Amino acid sequence: MKKWMKVAMVITVLAVMVMVGCKDEVVEPELTESEILVEYLIAQDLDFPDMLADWIITASAVHAAMDDYFIIDARTQAAYDVGHIPGAVFADASTILDVAATAGRKTIVVHCFKGIG
């Protein structure tokens, strides 16, 4: 009878070890590119809103001084062809740097679908 008790104890200990060892792993959700950037900037003691303060401009501010800006339309060619801001120049990911190089001394404004261009 003692032999059975020892076997039962070993089985119980093994069962507990298996249960503890097989607990669910905590899986962190994947971060978006924007979230990764914000975390990096915070870790570097950089203030994200202050950095963007001069980067973002309203459409009404651009409209009020159209000649001051070089407008790049980074939407699809089809969307640009249907209609675009007067004077805007189309550029895709492969041409945007070349197009931006033609801006002269004007401030570049990028128009896109998401507003994060």
Image: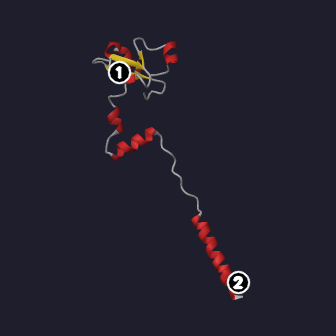
Density class for disc 1 (Cα within 10 Å; few <14, some 14-19, many ≥20) is some
Earlier along the polypeptide chain: callout 1 or callout 2? 2
- Check if mark 1's residue and mark 2's residue have beta carbons within 8 Å: no
Which residue occupies 59% across, 70% down? 17
Q: Which mark is residue 17?
A: none
Q: Amino acid at mark 2?
A: Trp
In the image, residue 25 sits, relative to residue 107, either above or below, namely: below
Q: CA distance from mark 1 to mark 2?
A: 81 Å
User: Quadrant location of the N terminus?
Assistant: bottom right
Q: Which mark is residue 4?
A: 2
* Residue sitting farthest toward the bottom: 2
Asked where in the image residue 94 lies, by quadrant, the reply is top left
* Residue sitting farthest toward the right: 1
Which residue occupies 65% across, 75% down? 12
In the image, residue 40 sits, relative to residue 13, either above or below, namely: above
Which residue occupies 41% across, 22% down? 95
Which residue occupies 69% across, 86% down? 3
Density class for disc 2 (Cα within 10 Å; few <14, some 14-19, many ≥20) is few
Q: Position of residue 16 (x, y in %)?
A: 61, 71
Q: Position of residue 11 (x, y in %)?
A: 66, 76
Callout 1 secondary element: helix
Q: Amino acid at mark 1?
A: Ala
Viewer-closest of 91 and 105: 91
Asked where in the image residue 51 lies, by quadrant, the reply is top left
In the image, residue 53 sits, relative to residue 85, either above or below, namely: below
Asked where in the image residue 44 lies, by quadrant, the reply is top left
**Residue of label 1:** 100
Q: Position of residue 32 (x, y in %)?
A: 47, 40
* Residue sitting farthest toward the left: 105
